Image (spheres, rainbow, N blue to C red):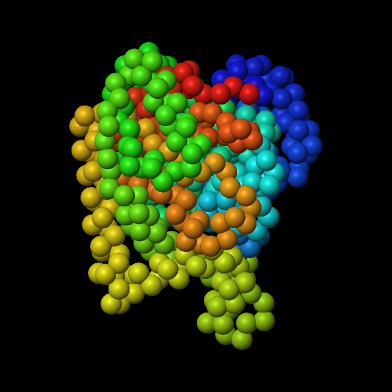
Amino acid sequence: MITLKEAMQLPKEEIAALREDLKRKIEEQKALNAYVALDERGEGVPLLIKDNIQVKGWSVTCASNILQGYVAPYDATVIEKIEKAGLSPFGRANMDEFAMGSSTESSCYGKTLNPHDPERVPGGSSGGSAAAVAAGIAIAALGSDTGGSIRQPAAFCGIVGMKPTYGRVSRWGLAAYSSSLDQIGPMTQNVEDAAILYDMLAGHDRRDSTSADIDDTPVAPNLNPDRKLTIAVVDNYVKDADSAVQKAYDAAIEALEKEGHTIVRKELMGAKYDIAAYYIVATAEASANLSRYDGVRYGNRAKEAKNLKEMYLKTRSEGFGEEVKRRILLGSFVLSSGYYDAYYLKAMKVRHLIKEEFEAVFKEADLILSPVAPTPAFRFGEMADALQMYLSDAYTVGVNLAGLPAISLPILKTDDGLPVGLQLIGRHFDEQTLFDGAMSLERAVCYKD
């Protein structure tokens, strides 16, 4: 598959031919179910868009029955930015419903398959984006990351997925799941493409009150994989990981040392605290954000309701899937009278401790190396228990709680051909160092198909 960098250098007629070739390949790999629709706009380099990002005139559904029939009345800021750079929205990517999931099994459009093994999940919630790039039916894609939803599917599918610092990329036009955690980011074939796409997305947006008004010097023109960095490794994070993940971790550390980077050993408090704080904060914010879906203003409305209350109840009961309902109920509970202090307030205090802990490590290190997931891609149905699925996010959610940038990239493959990815985590708003380190690691150890 042609890279994003290469595609952006093509003349107009060759881009048109590229788009037609992609359409053919998408049809051939329809069983993968990575695309929910092959919508097109413009004639630029095609970019796959996750189904929770507004594209004017497109049906944008967040892979939920409750939003069937909704047509986006405006463009997200990131859509305006990619079009200005010569890219065009090209297809809607499948995802977990309202970005709530780690396997893309909760989509109303059915599950997306992992191109490396159709019996395994592609990860989630940006599973469609990751699977399409890995299968060669998307040059690159946009995903969103609330607790690992870019990085984990990237690791499961063997591609690069990058979550920017919170506030670096505008959330205007992204359907909100957890407003203090959500970030849009690039999903690409390699680190350089991720840097190129990141540069298009980054920058202040007055329409997003959480957008940071700070310097956004482009990263891609200044990439330097030869920089020598101090990289912290967190051994206590790895002790419960699968042997394949530990093997990738050891290989990455050895390769980074050979590249001339300094490795320092650090510890972070157990990931169980990250998980507990995340699933309180995220579900609390989700319960508030998803209250707008009631059948009154847009999307599906239940039929034959006798009164307004019944219409609300039937619309939400019929429109939302089981996982979304579960998280709304959890969020409503932790915000309810008598439980707010015991759960939500305590989770916010833990969130502050997590942020301080990362900041302490960054006083001595430029980057942190960490697993993305405890295992390679698991089989469909293997995580039938919701709590077990939540625990699979152990290595990613802390990054979102602290608002840090991170990038997942493939390190090796297991004996049965499954990709294993690791992530580098950077300081707030230091994406340059993050990409420099990732490019060095990619050059040193990442497998090439």
Relative to 363, say whether 287 is above or below: below
Residue 75, visible in the rendered structure? no
Figure check: 159 above or below 384: above
> In this image, 105 relative to 325: left or right?
right
Quadrant into which the N terminus falls: top right
Q: Judge left or right: residue 35 versus residue 427.
A: right
In the rendering, at what x and y percent does residue 66 appear? 60, 64
Q: Is residue 68 visible?
A: yes
Relative to 209, residue 363 above or below? above
Q: Is residue 313 above or below residue 18?
A: below
Residue placed at 71% from the left, 19% from the top?
A: 14
Please name the residue shown 52% across and 24% down the image.
446
Task: Report x, y in % for residue 124.
Answer: 55, 48
Query: The C terminus lies in which quarter of the figure?
Result: top right
Give whichever of 196, 392 is nearer the camera.
392
The image shows a total of numbered marks equal to 0
Q: Position of residue 135 (x, y in %)?
A: 67, 34
The x and y percentages for residue 158 are 57, 33
Return the residue found at the far bottom. 306
Corner quadrant of residue 350:
bottom left
Q: Residue at x 39, y 59 (%)?
A: 279
**Quarter-of-image position of residue 251:** top left
Residue at image coords 54%, 41%: 376
Q: Nearer the viewer, residue 48 or 211?
A: 48
Horizontal arrangement in the rendering, residue 220 relative to residue 426 (left or right): right
Name which quarter of the figure residue 329 lies in: bottom left
